[in-house]
Image (cartoon, rainbow, N blue to C red):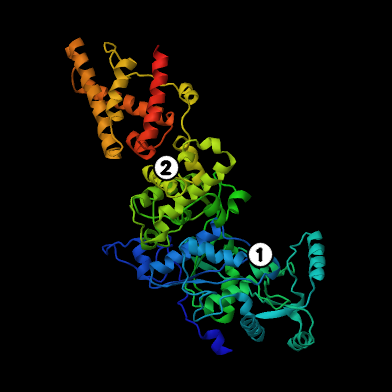
Amino acid sequence: MKSILHAARRTPVPQWTCNACRGIGDATTTFRPKNAARLTTAEQLRQAGPARTRFAPSPTGYLHLGSLRTALFNFMIAKATGGQFLLRIEDTDQKRTVKDAEERLYKDLEWAGIEWDEGPNIGGPYGPYKQSQRTTLYKEHADHLLETGNAYRCFCSARELDTRARYRAGLGLPPDYDRKCAHIPKEESDDRAAKGDAHVIRLFVRDRYPAFDDIVYGTVRPRTMIKSKAYEGSFDDPILLKSDGFPTYHLANVVDDHLMNITHVIRGAEWMSSTPKHVALYQAFGWSPPRFAHVGLLVDKDRQKLSKRLESMSMKELRDANGVFPETLTNFVALLGWSHNIRSDVLSMQDLIENASMKFTKGDTVVSLEKLWFLQKRHAARYASLQPPKPINPSHDLEELAVKPIMRSLDRQFLRAPHRFSFYRTLPEGSARLDFVRLLLWADALNYTSPDDFILRHVYFFAQPTSVALLSNSYRLVLYQLPPEANNTLPTSKFLPMFQTIYDLSEQDWSKPELKARIANIVDNGIAETLEELKKTNKDLYGSKIDSTVHKSWGNLVHGYIRWATMVGKPGPGGADTMAILGRTESLRRLKVAEDILQRSSD
């Protein structure tokens, strides 16, 4: 037994730290002189040496934002320090276990780029890594506490406990356990257990639960004295081993963290109230506890508990239904309670690891999905800058992450309403449609959020604008912000012929650079003509200020007209990009429809 209980590493007991030092580095770090070089929190973390961290989910549900954040923070710290990140499945709550939760957990973590060094499906030196396979260990450790007088058997049934709790509550007393079985002689307790009498094993808590040092919150001291509760016949002796032989979270958590050499426990603040019990258990075993860091709860914009819809949003829903990229999600989740000194919030997984620190936010963190979609756009643009061929890192492959999901969404929508895709259906199925979507995405990646939103934003790339749509968003040939002396309304007979240069462009030369050059030429010709007219009208108007105004006015007019003619004025890529993607035939068809509408309107 001694080898089992004391074979693992011994970490120095955390010492009290001043407020200025909490949350950065190890609590035992020596005092640094004022003239010493100031280290960043990330550098201090690395100087403390390799960390062994773990993520220990229960398969009673699927991975969601809060649990992903816990896994990510532990992963970042381990990888940043050259340590190890462990995955441990806490599956002792057999009644609430969801059938496919464990397999989904593996897939979701792998998709998010969180890889574990030791775990159930890959093994390791401290396995097994599923608590249901470690019950013998827990029983041995619970028996050790019985032998040392730090625990006792409780033979009270659930009905008895409930009856006594109701009675005490009726007297205005706390409904806590009254420690009835703590005074049963050891021989009698052993004999009843040997006969098979149902029982649990409880921790015998002495004077009070111990204080502990938290990296985020500093020294945390429990408020309630065990002795003061004793006057009311009330005790907080947590159950360690249940009557079915399975451990409670308290016992399994402490035994596993110690035997697996865990150096840092990073978890949600909801577990802070349980930590004194865990520290008491460490003391009962004669072990040194790991360092604790409790991160704030996730709340909504009104600082209320997350809605059930947001709180339970699973990785499958975010990935499949919303098309969120892995690095978008890890980037978003990392910013929920962790601060950094980097200029940009757009961070890859490698960026997160390189800048990881224990600089976690004290208090609750607001979850805003607007930030998620902002990051999605920035990562899409970042991936688009990694031009084909495909990037080495699969998590940066925009074709797999976005192009193909857009195609699948288009196929679904096309089956329901083919009339809504009048242009898209003219493209041959297969590579032609794939190339079309790819070009569109690369041209406007900065505005990509999800497949459905992207299709809606670029609806006129898939559907040909109708005359009705163009008329309902009529376009005026007006040079805005010009002085009163200028004739700022252009006749169609003067404006439309300027686009002949685009009509004359051959299929072979139809490309973004050539289109961009010809559009610029149209703008320049218009500017020159307007400036010449103004010079004749009033020489005093001719100068740098009016020159800038005319440049801006003609740029807005020409580009605005192209956007109206091709996209009914909807936002999207620039005119040259748009016409290059649509191709010569479709672009000229749309320009011709717009031209006819303008001419009829001017008649």
Q: Which residue is mark 2?
A: 447
Q: Position of residue 598 (x, y in %)?
A: 39, 19
Q: How many C-alpha atoms fall within 10 Å of the one at disc 2: few (<14), some, or many (≥20)?
A: many
Amino acid at dot 1: Val
Image: 155 above or below 166 = below
- In the displayed structure image, the side of residue 586 where residue 5 appears, left or right: right
Q: Which residue is mark 1?
A: 98
Q: Position of residue 241 (x, y in %)?
A: 68, 76
Res 306 visible: no
Q: Quadrant of residue 238?
A: bottom right
- In the displayed structure image, the side of residue 221 where residue 97 appears, left or right: right
Kindly identify the residue that appears in the image at 42 percent across and 15 percent down.
Answer: 601
Q: Secondary structure at mark 2?
A: helix
Which residue is at the front of the view, 471 or 536? 471
Q: Are marks 2 and 1 in contact (CB under 8 Å)?
A: no
Q: Earlier in the sequence, mark 2 or mark 1?
A: 1
- Name the mark nearer the viewer: 2 or 1: 2
